[in-house]
Amino acid sequence: MRKEFNITGSCNPQWHYMVDLSKRMDTVEKLIERGKYFTINRARQYGKTTMLNMVWRSLSDRYLVIPLSFEGLGDETFASTAAFVASFRRQMARQLVSLRQDNVLTGIWQDRDASTIEDLSSVVTDFCKACPKPVVLTIDEVDKSSDNQLFMNFLGMLRNKYLERDREGMSHTFHSVILAGVYDIKNLKLKLRPDVERKYNSPWNIAADFNVDMTFHPEEIAQMLDDYEVDAHTGMDIKTISEEIYKYTTGYPFLVSCICKIIDERMDAEWTPNHVQQAVKTIAKGENITLIDDLSKNIENNTELSDFLYSIVINGQEYSYSMVDPIVRLANMFSYIRENLRGKTMIHNLIFEEVLFVYFGNKTMREQGDRISPFVTSYIHNGKLNMEHVVTRFRDLMREEYRESTAPFLEKEGRLLFLTFLKPIINGIGFYYVEPQTRDNRRMDLVVTYDRQEFVIELKIWRGDKYEEHGRNQLSDYLAIRGMDKGYLVTYDLSKNKQDTEPQWIEWNNKQIFEVIV
């Protein structure tokens, strides 16, 4: 049976097309060899469970690797210390049976009378001393219980035994403990809902830093597609496709695999840049995509996070990429942002950016009603998008519907209004994204594709004649980089001094620029 691209649960190289994880495993193995306790805290569907299973598959010959998960533990588990200890003992015994360990080791967990954390500590000591190999404990989905005091007590027990290793010896406790989850166990006060009081300080300050890049880079995506091509024989241009996938995902593991799966199974394995884009659009719709569903829920549940992402996506605001700021840390923990070349925040990938555009755009449409809907007119002729007509009609709409709008409203909302206006015109065929290197408070370049057409539109705020010329230079330079001859400049005139200027084509630095002043 041919392997497949996997987007549910852990990946197995025998069943699934995967990137090569050997370099990442080398780092993990060194941490385990040194007896480190650490946490793999990454965003949802980022490969955490796959990494834990790789530890079990790769190191079980040298260590007794015991994989546990706190997924699905009910409230009854944390009703009392005795209930928690009993639940942990059952999980340990069940895993030892599954791993076909001898009855002596299994019996330590099944037969010992233990109902307190102190009792549990003694059981751990006896078990590790009896085990012929160093014991590595992995616990997945650990943050599902991280706001419970009993869990804090459990971590405290592990911490105390870790600190006692110098006196008692390595064999009296787990050689290495690996916890995996979204939230950083070392910072338990960092929770999604800011209105919920958190009382606990984490005892997990013994944990070593886990500095492993788990994103998929273009060459790694290409390696995975090489493996696929051996079986599928599609004739794709692997380098082009891998770079195109990376362009939209920035290597987010789930998004990479999801694009590949959609093309392979739902698009008759047509591996072209256009099909990559269509797969991206499918993901961005969020239908049965839990990652996208989580994004919308998280910004609905946290106004501060929503405002923060809005200011980056729509207003072009840049913040220092510093984990000192709790909201930056929160957005980074979910991998909604990443660091740009200037040390500032930016949205992690173009798919998330598209989702956020749609979310904020739909919200604006609900608030504004029909005021920003496109005129009933033809923007598409013979399958071609008339961008000159689009930006001109948008200018007419803004004049007609927002004649009395104040300058602060336009500066805050103008860009989003244009994107909201554009979305239904190109919906289903076209795609747009903001060029990251040109996003700031004064300007941002919007790249719009429609079928095989491509357009560059610069959206900027009027700051005077000097800035207008500077904007033309920037746009013409960007057009030159992309090998294009035409571009579109939409300027919001907050002073309303230039709003009577009619749309026009001008030649600037050997480029044709269509200027519209709103």
Image (tube, grey):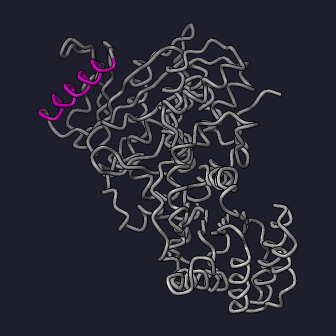
Magenta stretch, main secondary structure class: helix
Which residue reaches farthest left?
466
* Residue 229 occupies quadrant: top right
Q: Is residue 505 left or right of residue 214?
A: left
Asked if the stretch drawn in magenta spans residue 477, the answer is yes
The residue nearer to you, when weighing 189 against 8, is 8
Residue pictured at 62% horizontal, 77% vertical: 171
- Residue 207's place in the image compared with 342, above or below, is below
* Residue 317 coordinates in the image, percent (x, y): 33, 50
Residue 197 visible in the picture:
no
Which residue reaches farthest front?
132
- Residue 270's place in the image compared with 109, above or below, is above
Residue pictured at 48% horizontal, 63% vertical: 330
* Residue 310 coordinates in the image, percent (x, y): 44, 52
* Residue 497 coordinates in the image, percent (x, y): 20, 37
First to last magenta residue range: 466-482
Residue pictured at 78% horizontal, 80% vertical: 77
* Residue 300 coordinates in the image, percent (x, y): 58, 60
* Residue 492 occupies quadrant: top left
Q: Quadrant of the N terminus?
A: top right
Asked if the stretch drawn in magenta spans residue 108, the answer is no
- Residue 187's place in the image compared with 227, above or below, is below
The residue nearer to you, when weighing 260 against 203, is 203
